[in-house]
Amino acid sequence: MKQFLFIAVCLTVAPALVSAQTPTGTITGTIRYTGIIPPSQRITLTDGQILIHNDVVVHKKSKGLRDAAVLLDWTGKVPVNPKLKPVLIDQRDMVFLPRVVTIQQGRKVRFENNDIFNHGVSAQSILGENSFNLTTPPGRGFEHTFKAQANPIPIGCVLHSWMRAYVIVRPHPYHAVTDADGTFRIANVPAGKHTLWLLHPDTNYRETIMVNVIGNKTVDLAITWGKLKK
């Protein structure tokens, strides 16, 4: 599996804490994909049903790309909101739903199996805190707290090889995943010039763009990709 490449910037001073007085704005946008969509996979399940799957999910009308992650390259210190509920990743209809999630370190992820079949949840990482392999019987679940790392954490099911998901953990809350229309929204972003990482985990496509956030305003981005491989 290819690895995502990120540039780590080391600071000689402690990162600033975002205060209530810091001006903030909102980043919204749409990621469209106009390139060739690979053929869908036909997967025969144990009960004979056919599952149609494609790593690249594009809205037919808008060309919006689903499950792309948008991440602010931010080094400031932001406490996690203790009132936030765990992010749910469900095992349903023989797939992980949602397929891609972004979370802030300290917020839990809850894995549930709402299928009638046994499943497993395996996480692969060089960090021990982000690596495990557990069985999830029907109707059961568990929670896990991941540690922030540069690369997405692949999630799989050892019983069903086509089942995949990705957990992306950051030390801040400034990130989002595109929806079925390819749109995203990141609120309360500190004002200033920032770098945005754009990632499509299934194809390992990534790029960066610069964005200037102005306090109490929304910057809307229109992003079009013609290919998903470099």
Image: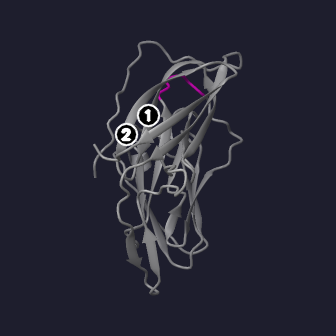
In this picture, which residue range is highlighted in magenta? 73-78
Q: Describe the colour scheme in one phrase.
A: one colour
Q: Position of residue 38 (x, y in %)?
A: 35, 60
Q: Quadrant of residue 217?
A: top right
Report how many numbered discs are placed on residues in the image. 2
Say which amino acid is labelled 2.
Answer: Arg
Compute the Cα span from label 2 to label 1: 7 Å
Of label 2 and label 1, which has the lower sequence position?
1
Q: Residue at x 43, y 67 (%)?
A: 53
Say which amino acid is labelled 1.
Answer: Trp
Pick out the residue farthest to the front: 61
Pick out the residue farthest to the bottom: 48
Question: Pointer 2: residues within 10 angstroms few (<14), some, or many (20+)?
Answer: some
Pick out the residue farthest to the top: 13
Question: Which type of secondary structure does the marked residue at label 2 adopt?
Answer: strand
Q: Residue at x 54, y 55 (%)?
A: 61
Instruction: Answer whether residue 100 is magenta in the image.
Output: no
Evaluate whether residue 89 shows in this view.
yes
Instruction: Answer whether residue 76 is magenta in the image.
Output: yes
Q: Is residue 217 above or below residue 199?
A: above
Q: Are marks 2 and 1 in contact (CB under 8 Å)?
A: yes
Task: Name the one closer to the observer, 64 or 162.
Answer: 64
Q: Which residue is mark 1?
A: 197
Q: Which residue is mark 2?
A: 206
Q: Quadrant of residue 4?
A: top left
Q: Is residue 203 above or below residue 193?
A: below
Task: Name the one closer to the observer, 3 or 210.
Answer: 210
Specify the principal SS of the magenta part. loop
